[in-house]
Image (tube, rainbow, N blue to C red):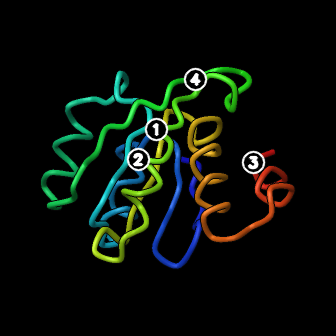
Amino acid sequence: VAFMAVSDHVYRSSYPSPTSRPFLTRLGLRTAICLQPEDLREDVRAFFSSLNVALHEVDVGEDHEPFVTMSEHRLAQAVSLALPAESQPALIFCSTGTQRTSVVVACLRRWQGWCLASALDEFR
């Protein structure tokens, strides 16, 4: 599973696999944000439910040029779900942890005050 800390209490990853679940359990997650809900399996829902993790499904869309067709409203929604202290630790994920997740993290970085060039550089 692709995994990275975005900040002290916000993480990003690819789709949670059965082998990654013990590690994810140790994080003490409060929130999980799935950016690709059409691929969300029942076993993953059950896993987060068993941990009392609030699971949010935010379909941000997709494109090879994500800033052109992704929903700004849904991108903002995903970022706003991850930011409040009461929602953290939070996990943001999609199938590969790359395109959709990277766009949301770039938006989060801009909210954190990163310049556009730095946010886009991390995106690449």
| Callout 2 secondary element | helix
Q: Amino acid at mark 3?
A: Phe
* Cα distance in 3D space between marks 2 and 1: 6 Å
Q: Amino acid at mark 4?
A: Glu
| Callout 3 secondary element | helix
Is 73 left or right of 32, judged from the image as shown?
right
Q: Nearer the viewer, residue 98 or 107?
A: 107
* Cα distance in 3D space between marks 3 and 1: 19 Å
* Residue for badge 3: 123
Marking on residue 122:
none
Q: Residue at x 84, y 53 (%)?
A: 121
Q: Nearer the viewer, residue 79 or 99?
A: 79
Q: Amino acid at mark 1?
A: His
Q: Quadrant of the C terminus?
A: top right
Question: Which x, y percent locates residue 115?
Answer: 80, 63
* Cα distance in 3D space between marks 3 and 2: 19 Å
Task: Please tell me whether mark 3 or mark 1 is closer to you in this view.
Answer: 1
Looking at the image, tell me whether mark 4 or mark 2 is earlier in sequence order.
4
Does the CB distance between marks 4 and 3 fall below 8 Å? no
- The local crowd at label 3, few if under 14, some if 14 to 19, many if 20 or more residues have their Cα within 10 Å, is some
Looking at the image, tell me whether mark 3 or mark 2 is earlier in sequence order.
2
Q: Amino acid at mark 2?
A: Gln
* Cα distance in 3D space between marks 4 and 3: 15 Å
- The local crowd at label 2, few if under 14, some if 14 to 19, many if 20 or more residues have their Cα within 10 Å, is some
* Cα distance in 3D space between marks 4 and 1: 14 Å
| Callout 1 secondary element | helix
* Cα distance in 3D space between marks 4 and 2: 16 Å
Q: Nearer the viewer, residue 121 or 91?
A: 121
* Residue for badge 4: 62
